[in-house]
Amino acid sequence: MPVDQHSDPFDASQTDPFEDRLSAALHQAGGTFDTNRAALAAAGAARGRRLRLQRRAAVLGGAASVALAAVGGALLVPWGGSAPPSRATAVGAAPKPSASPSAPADPVSAQQMIETLKKLMPKGTFSQEAGRGTEQDSSRQIAAPYASVVFDDGKGPGAVSLSVSRVQPGTQEAQEASRCPDKVFVPYDACTTKRLDDGSVITVLQGYEYPDRRVDTKLWRAELLTPKGEQVSVMEWNAAGEKDSPISRPEPPLDPEQLTRLASAQEWRTVAAAVPEPPRETPNPGSQTPKLDVHARATLLQLLPEGLDVVGKSSGDDSGFAYAVVDDGKGKSLVQVNVQPNMLDVAGELFGSGSETLSDGTRVAVHQGPGEKSAAGSVMWTVDTMRPDGRRVVISAFNSGTQRDAATRPTPALTIAQLREMALSTHWFRAQGTN
Amino acid sequence: MRQVRAQEYAEFAAARTGQLYRSACLLTAGDTHLAEDLVQETLGRVYLRWGRVSRVGNPAAYAQTVLTRTFLAHKRLRRNTERATDAVPDTADELPDASLRLTLLQALGELPAKDRAVVVLRYWEDRSVQETADVLHASSAAVRTRSVRALARLRGLLGEDIGVYARP
C-alpha cells in the first residue's frame, strides 16, 4: 500500500540523522526501565479475570448492572469509551458511555473502496490496485478504509490514494486537518482552504514528497472535513510510487479542481457512515494548559530587537514553544524558543563547563555551532538559561528561514548578546511576578 | 479460559510484559507507577479477548495498540496532572546513561499526549505512518503533521545532537 513505512515523506529522512538519533536515544532510555515482570503479568491476568466477571454480570444482570454495562460496552468497542486504568479514581469518574458509537451503517469492502475510487476518477487506465474496507479485525478495533491505484490518463502513471476517517469536530486534530500547514515545517508551492456549500472545509496542498526536495517528486493532497467530522484525504504523486520511483509526468494526474471534486463526492460520506465515531474528546483549547502562565509567542514577538521584519511566526496554540522568522534586510533567520518549568534536575547536564552563573543564581550557557540538519553552511546559535528555581528559557537562532533550508546568510540575524538579553528577560514569566 | 489457551496467554504475558512496560514508561514520560497500571490494564484486556486475539491477530501488536489507547484515554481524563519529573525513579542517578534518559523523558513530557504517542510508535515501536494512524484513530495526514511538529519540538529541546547529554 502506498502509505507504508518506507514511503513516508518525513521518513524519507531515513537519512535525517536526528530521527536516527532519536530512535537510538529512545531505545537506550527505554531499555533501562525494568520491573517485576512476573508480578505485573500476574496482576494483568487478575485484571482480565475481573473484567470477564464484570462482563458476564453485565450480560446476565438487569438494571442492577448498569454501571458494569459501561465496562462491557467498552470491551466490545474498546475505544468507544474505555474504562480508566485502576489508579484513575472511581468508576463514577469514568468517561460517559455516551462515547460509544451509534450503530454504523453497512460495512464497505476493500473492493468497493477501489471500485468507487476508479468510478470517480477521470478516464484512464488503472493498475496496482489496493484497498481496505470498513471491516474491523482483532488487531484494528476501528475501521480505516482506504483505496489506492496507479492511474494513467495517457500522459504517464501517477499514484493516487484516498482514505476515509472520522474525527471529533472541534478538536485540535480537526482544526489541524482543515488548515494549511506552517511553511516552516512543510514546504509547498500552493495551499488553499475553502468552505463548500454544505459547510465542509477543504484544503488542497500542492507540495513535495521530500521536505528537503532532494528529489522533486510532487505530492498533492486534498483534505476534506465535514461539519460532522467525516474526513476524506486524497494524495497523489507525479510518479507511480511515492518513493524511489522515477518521476513519470510533470505534475500529479488530478488538478486541484479534480482533487476537490473527488474528495467531496457523496460516495465517501457513505463510507464514513460505516466508520464508528471516534472517542469523544472535549474540544481542547486548554488541553496543554501551561504549568506556568507562559505565552511564548507573544513574549518572543515582543522581545525581538527593533529593525527586524517578522515574516513568519508559529500559530500560537502552544504555550511553551514559539518561533518567529525574521529578516533584517539581509535574509531570513529562524528564531525559536522553549520555555519550561522545573528543569533543575537536568541543570548539571545543560550547564556544564563553560557556562556562567549570574549574581542572582541564573545559569547561562551559549552554544555556537553548525546546524546539523541537511543543509550545508547552516549555523545554529543557542542561549540556554535557567533561573535558580528551575525555569528554563532556551532560544536558538538559525541563518536560514527554516531548520531545513540552505543558509540564506552567513550568521543569524540576532547576535548572541541579543539572544542572551531576550532569554534573560523577566517577561517570559511576567504573570508570576517573580524574578 | 481453557487450559491450553491459559498456557498460551501465560507465555505471551511472560514474553511481552517487559516490552510493554518499557513502552509504557516512554509514553508516560517516566511515570513508572502509571506505566504499571497501564500495562496491567492492557494485559487484562488482552486476557479477556485472548481467544480471538491469538487465533487471528498479532497479539504483540494488538497489545501495543491497547496500551497506547489506554494511555490516551487516561490522559483525556487527567490532563496536566502528571509531571515527568515527579516520577523519575531514584535509581536513575546510578545508571550510566541516566542523564540521557532524564533529558529525553523531560522532553517527551513536554509533548502533548498524542504527539508523544506518535513519537513512541514511530521511533520506538518502528510502526509505519499508516499503522500509527490506525492505532490512534487518526488519518495518516494527521500523523504526519504531528510527527513533524513533535520532531521540531524535540529538536529544539534536545538539540540536534541528542547524544551529547549521554556524555556528561
Image: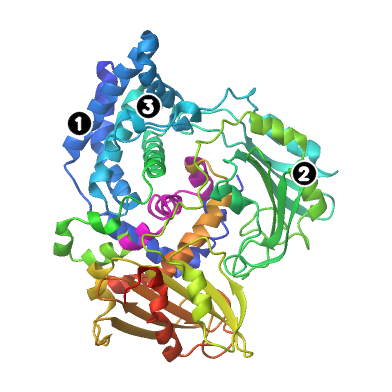
Q: Chain of mark 2?
A: A
- Residue marked by disc 2: A262
The crowd level at tag 2 (other Cα within 10 Å; few <14, some 14-19, many 20+) is: many
Q: Amino acid at mark 2?
A: Leu
Q: Which mark is residue B54?
A: 3
Q: Name the residue: 36% across, 63% down.
A: B107
| Relative image position of residue A43 (x, y in whole percent) | 21, 32
Q: Secondary structure at mark 2?
A: helix
Of residues B30 and A321, the one drawn nearer to the viewer in this rendering = A321
The crowd level at tag 1 (other Cα within 10 Å; few <14, some 14-19, many 20+) is: some
Asked which quadrant contains residue A48, the reply is top left
Q: Amino acid at mark 3?
A: Ser
Q: Magenta: predominant secondary structure element?
A: helix
Q: Amino acid at mark 1?
A: Ala
Total number of numbered discs in the rendering: 3
| Relative image position of residue A325 (x, y in whole percent) | 57, 77
- Residue marked by disc 1: A42
> Which of marks 1 and 2 precedes in the sequence?
1
Nearest to the eye among marks 3 and 2: give it. Answer: 2
Asked which quadrant contains residue A58, the reply is top left
Determine if the magenta segment contains residue A7: no
Q: Name the residue: 54% across, 64% down.
A: A316
Nearest to the eye among marks 3 and 1: give it. Answer: 1
Q: Which mark is residue A125?
A: none
Of residues A313 and A142, the one drawn nearer to the viewer in this rendering = A313
